[in-house]
Amino acid sequence: MHEPIPPAPTRAEAEAAGLGTHPGARRPDRRRTVSSGGLDIAVWEWGDPDDPPVLLAHGGFDFAGTFDTLAPRVADAGFRVVSWDQRGCGDSAHAHLYSWDADLRDAAAVLDSIGPRALPVVGHSKGGAQMLQLADALPHRVSHLVNLDGLPSRRSWPDVPDHHRTRMLNGELGAWLDHRRRAGTKVRRPGTVDELAERRGRMNPRMDPAWLRYLVPIGAYERADGWRWKIDASMRMGGFGPWRPEWSMSRLPSLGMPVLCVLGLDLEVMGWGTLPEDVLPHLPPGARFVPLEGVGHFVHIEQPQVVADLVLELIA
């Protein structure tokens, strides 16, 4: 039998264990589980449970702990901030297959667990593109939308005509099944805290090494041979089935709720390569667009107070 993997600590557990800290970062106050089609999804909350809720969606290959600097700032302004580890990430269960639509069903399950009323949603990168689709599909459940550098552009990703999308299905599904066959038994390579931080730093080169080390005990687990990230080794970018990142941008003009789009202008490896001129023609009426100079893709980590102020200005 496999030894169970302990969940990431809450704020009280981290303080009791004397775990490392980072300036401005704070672990969630509560942890709970939501079932999405039988799959356990780890949900995290900052702030008073009776305060009005705000939903945060993390990016690809991230986990809710990457909001540990943004979420407390929003919570301290009088909000119940809710986020979740997407399937295969953090403390959520691993799945046999991963898809964009499955992630959206998980998001809807978390949304339903908060209550029936519309609420603000904030998404970064992949999470931002997902919240665009969620707001488009369930506009009665989303009161405000904040997109943090989750606006893929057609300029960087060649689109295909609608009549070719069906043809894509066989190729995309076949390629994913081949990948799953090869990766089904893989496990992530162990290492020290510094080694895991260094590996993550290759994809997050602008991040403070101290921040990356702070994330390891949250998003990884320790065994006798070292630490391993909890992210399922069989996951890959793109998920299961035909999807192109720029399809998300096409949903932006139709949104009727208040919208804020934040874009980091310093291009980096994990970003979409989107420029302001790619976004401006798609903004719905009344939407606000904020480009940030000297900031990369992880806008909420590099400038958590700036982003928190922008979010609070929209939803307060």
Image: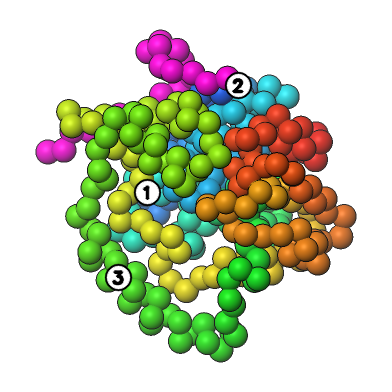
Badge number at residue 24: 2
Q: Residues within 10 Å of mark 3 (few under 14, many from 20)?
A: some
- Secondary structure beneath label 2: loop
Q: Residues within 10 Å of mark 2 (few under 14, many from 20)?
A: few
Circles 1 and 2: CB distance less than 8 Å?
no
**Residue tagged 3:** 177
**Quadrant in which the C terminus appears:** top right
Q: Residue 59 in the image: state x and y as whole percent.
A: 53, 48
Q: Residues within 10 Å of mark 1 (few under 14, many from 20)?
A: many
- What span is in magenta? 1-24
Q: Nearer the viewer, residue 68 or 43?
A: 68
Q: Identity of the amino acid at label 3?
A: Leu
**Residue tagged 1:** 88
Q: Residue at x 59, y 28 (%)?
A: 69
Circles 3 and 2: CB distance less than 8 Å?
no
Measured along the vertical axis of the image, is residue 267 above or below residue 52?
A: below
Label 3 vs label 2, nearer the camera? 2
Query: How many circles with numbers are drawn on the protein?
Result: 3
Q: Nearer the viewer, residue 41 or 167?
A: 167
C-alpha distance separating marks 1 and 2: 27 Å
C-alpha distance separating marks 3 and 1: 17 Å
Q: Residue 12 in the image: state x and y as whole percent.
A: 46, 15
